[in-house]
Amino acid sequence: MAERKGTDSLDRLHRRAKALTGMPVTRRDAERALAACLSDSDMWTVIRHSHAPLRYTTCLWDLMEKEGLLTTQDGRLTLTEEGKSLAEALGIGPPMTFDCPHCDGRGVDVSSGLLKSLLERFRQIAQERPTALQKFDQGYVTVETTIARVAVAWAKGDLTGKSVIVLGDDDLVSIALALTGVCRNVLVIDIDRRLIRFIRQVARSERLTNLEAREHDLRNPLPDAWLGQFDTFLCDPTESFVGFKVFIDRGLLALKGAGSAGYFGLTRLESSLSKWQRIQQFLLSRGAVVTDIRDRFHWYENWDYVEKMRAWDWLPAKERPRDIWYQSALFRIELLRTPRISNEPVVGDIFTDNEAATT
């Protein structure tokens, strides 16, 4: 009887939150949002454990609070006794993590050997990087994440002797790539001239002769000189579906063809599984196959503009995060054929859609 009542209650809350937000979510997302509330009381930690679109979960939590299932105070989310009883009736427990303590679950240990020396050198350089800007949807990952991303591509054979292009680079992955000394050449393109100036300065001071930085807006076509010239691309695209396609299409246009590879990140906070499905269908249509997905691989430093981001108004408590809360999965794709893609201008907003939270 308690389980039936709990099921009806969660179903009702889920349907209401889905209708209010227009999000393409399932009841399983409601279960994840409820389970996350059992993981901790810190709001940002609960968000990190929710594994569901932030716009939907914050709406669901608001409805739960109105029904006496949840309380919010001093930046903390706490299930009431009634809320705990609901979770218990449904057999829902806190999300479990069994991450390796040496690599934070990434599967790459950057704390020893060759990667340790690379990390130490890169850390010193990254301290002087420009701050992240909201207008470009910037938000950079930790230095450990950048080195781990490079290590994965290196281990996959996508760097040694290869030509690599980086599309957008507040993470400074182009510098880390060049520091390995194994890439034939590295080209980084970015709309932010502050980043381009910084990367050029580092290339000169570190004598990275294989690193070139060029200012370019990805909404504009790629120059002919860059088309079909690279073995590997890396990017961290904006997660609106339109913006994602722009980044990936430009990356694919730059690749030589079958056997070339691409790397990018994708969250669960700004991309529902429905969007993940659309993205995978899009990649297949482009002749690419997903070879690797490493969940919660990218850990992002907290950005200064958190109070100005779209999701701030949705949050149940207005407290700035103290620890890392924003994470994304690392994807690797490989081309099976040369795709037919139009290299045309893209007009309009590529940063926002109904699921966007941090723009």
Image (tube, rainbow, N blue to C red):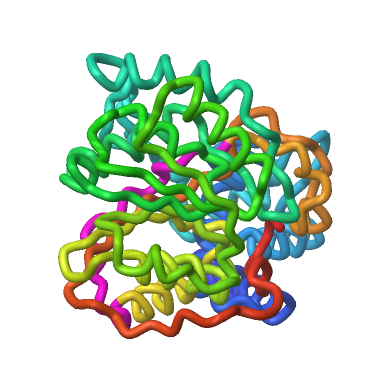
268 vs 303, nearest the viewer: 303
Q: Position of 67 compared to 145: left or right?
A: right
6 vs 276, nearest the viewer: 276
Q: Which residues are magenta?
A: 284-300
Q: Residue at x 42, y 35 (%)?
A: 146
Q: From the top left corner, tell me how far across and down residue 71 is, in percent.
A: 77, 46
Q: Main secondary structure of the magenta part?
A: strand
Q: Residue at x 52, y 51 (%)?
A: 35
Q: Residue at x 33, y 14 (%)?
A: 117
65 vs 74, nearest the viewer: 74
Above or below: residue 250 compared with residue 91: below
Q: From the top left corner, tell me how far across and down residue 145 is, in percent.
A: 43, 34
| Residue 43 falls in image quadrant | top right
Q: From the top left corner, tell me how far across and down residue 240 is, in percent.
A: 59, 69
24 vs 286, nearest the viewer: 286
Which quarter of the rendered picture does the C terminus lie within? Answer: bottom right
Above or below: residue 212 compared with residue 332: above
Residue 34 shows up from this direction? yes
For residue 294: magenta?
A: yes
Q: Residue at x 56, y 65 (%)?
A: 218
